[in-house]
Image (cartoon, rainbow, N blue to C red):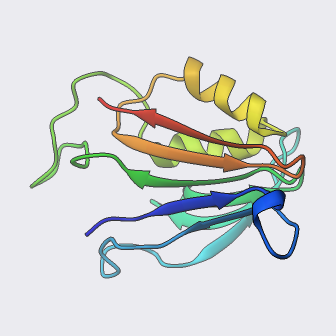
Amino acid sequence: RGCSLMAGLPTKMENGHTVMARNYDFNDVIEEMCFARTKVKGKYSHIGSLLNLFGRCDGINDCGLAVCKASNGLPVGNFDGGQKPGVTGFQFWVLIRSILENCKNVEEAMDFAMKAPIGYNINLMAADKNNKIALFQCID
């Protein structure tokens, strides 16, 4: 079991639009399973699925940047069954929310992710209104 991601550019899609999708194969008992819209002064507003009350599993901001994720290997964290962190850094839900609030396109999102301290195994996919898509992979 595991989440999957996909994206298609307009030239490959029948409807002529950039498409990005993600399925959810984690534990629906321990997750919030709800969406929230966030508007922080001086940041891009966004809507997405909640995680740990303040974080995001995925979302889209008012600039047309969409971000989603799938775990890449064992989940990292200090919990039963989790891989102990090898580095100090953000969990994915902090990274995704930060990207949605601070980046307006795929280029900015990938630059942000490359500079962020990440302590999680993650496949991060981004797509924007300019028909750009990217996959960022990080292994702790």
- Let me know if residue 65 appears in the view: yes
Residue 100: give x, y in percent of width and height: 72, 46
Q: Nearer the viewer, residue 96 or 54?
A: 96
Toward the left, the furthest residue is: 80
The answer to whether residue 64 is above or below residue 134 is below
- Let me know if residue 38 appears in the view: no
- Which residue is at 45% across, 45% downward? 123
Residue 116: give x, y in percent of width and height: 54, 23
- Which residue is at 67% across, 23% downward? 111
- Counting labels gives 0
Would you say 22 lies left or right of 80 here? Answer: right
Would you say 89 lies left or right of 41 here? Answer: left
- Which residue is at 48% across, 73% downward? 23
Image quarter for residue 114?
top right
The answer to whether residue 44 is above or below residue 114 is below
Residue 65: give x, y in percent of width and height: 79, 50
